[in-house]
Amino acid sequence: MSCDRRVISLRFNQDQGCFSCCMESGIRIYNLEPLVEKSHYDTEMVGSVSQCEMLFRTNILAIVSGGARPKMPDNILHLYDDSKKKVFMEIKFSSSIRAVRLRRDKIVVALLNKIHVFSILYPTQELFSLETRDNYKGLCEVSPLASAQKEVLIFPGHKLGSVQIVDISNTEQGISSAPVYIAAHKNELACLALNQQGTKIATASCQGTLIRVWDTSSRNLLQELRRGSDAATVYCINFSRDSDYLCCSSDKGTVHIFAIKQTNLNKRMAMSNVGILGKYGESQWGLAHFTVSAECACLCAFGPQNSVYALCLDGTAHKYVFSSEGICNMEVFDVFLDVDDDDDEF
């Protein structure tokens, strides 16, 4: 792959129906059903870009420069209006931006050890900020829907392996209330996910063998799901839109699918082995899985009708359909970097 075609990062939008592709040669925006390119921003417009967060399917993009030919330092957030083809707001921070998350009413920016929350209507107006432990991966997620049962922001807490939960429905409360934590893992967090309803959190540590699912209100552990027995780097965790399923991807090149609602669908070890192996023998293993290239990172998310997408940094897109019996079949394989442009609005 040429340098200009090198993919730096990929990110699904909030409903997982589109994704942004940040490259040395700019940004591309894709629709998933069908897989078509919807917008293209070259280096003359935006430079090389390390992060791009969409706001659902609106014309608003949050962009952070990076790569070999950045237009701006990586401590400046650009809010870009696709309809006007220009940046309409810049927000400068004291250090490099690790992650950006958008809701229709708020902007969340993660730095190495601080989280900033702004009003999207008045981007220069900071609602509040919170100190964090060193967060090199920029781990943070926010419930995307205004109609969500709970409007929460999650990120690594100060204690190793913990998750902090902040209620963002009341920004004053977010400042004054005592911090709410989940002691999720004994090791450093590697990946976080939040369902659309804001009621469930999924966590994985740098060990990468277990994924734990938590209730945001009670902070109780709901499920412990086993990705595998060998240590792995977990790249991505995502809930289905109805929270019935969860998927994850790792550097083992395998995408695992777990049942969250009907846990009896998940595979378990034969009963004869359970007593000997203890907690390991009691683990819930995936309902289904499929394999992509282990040589490059990939993101995974659910599509319609029990389908799962895997998008890889090598430019490949995989779509599999799974059944409640655990059968998983490929439906689509494509190279999204070679997909033709589509001039329709996204």
Image (cartoon, rainbow, N blue to C red):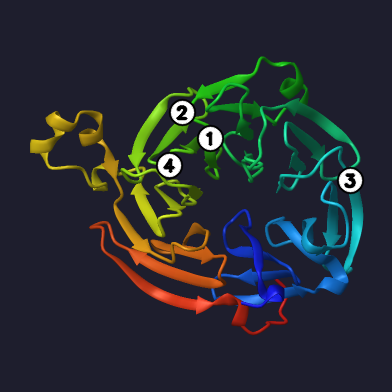
Left or right of 270, for residue 118: right
Q: What crowding class fits label 4: few (fewer than 14 Cα within 10 Å), some (14-19), or many (20 or more)?
A: many
Q: Residues within 10 Å of mark 1 (few under 14, many from 20)?
A: many
Q: CA distance from mark 1 to mark 2?
A: 7 Å
Q: Are marks 3 and 2 in contact (CB under 8 Å)?
A: no
Disc 3 secondary structure class: strand
Calculate the distance from the C-alpha at mark 1 to the C-alpha at mark 4: 9 Å
User: Are the two marked residues, 1 and 2, in contact with CB atoms closer than 8 angstroms?
Assistant: yes
Given contact means CB atoms under 8 Å apart, are the residues at marks 2 and 4 in contact? Answer: no
Dot 1: element: strand
Circle 1 is placed at which residue position? 189
The front one of 64 and 288 is 64
Say whether disc 4 or disc 3 marks the residue closer to the N-terminus: 3
Q: Earlier in the sequence, mark 2 or mark 4?
A: 2
Outermost residue to the left:
272
Q: Relative to 271, is 131 above or below? A: above
Which label is found at residue 119? none
Q: Amino acid at mark 1?
A: Leu
Q: Which residue is mark 3?
A: 91
Amino acid carrying mark 4 in the image: Gly
Instruction: Please indicate whether residue 287 sits to the left or right of residue 218 in the image.
Output: left
Q: Quadrant of the N terminus?
A: bottom right
Is 8 rendered above or below residue 178? below
Judged from the image, the secondary structure of the residue bearing numbered disc 2 is loop
First along the sequence among labels 3 and 2: 3
Which residue is the site of mark 4?
A: 208
Left or right: residue 19 versus residue 230 is right
Mark 4 lies on a secondary structure that is loop
Give the residue pinned by disc 2. 185
Mark pair 3, 2: CA separation: 34 Å
Residue at the image point whose x is 73% and y is 58% from the top:
50
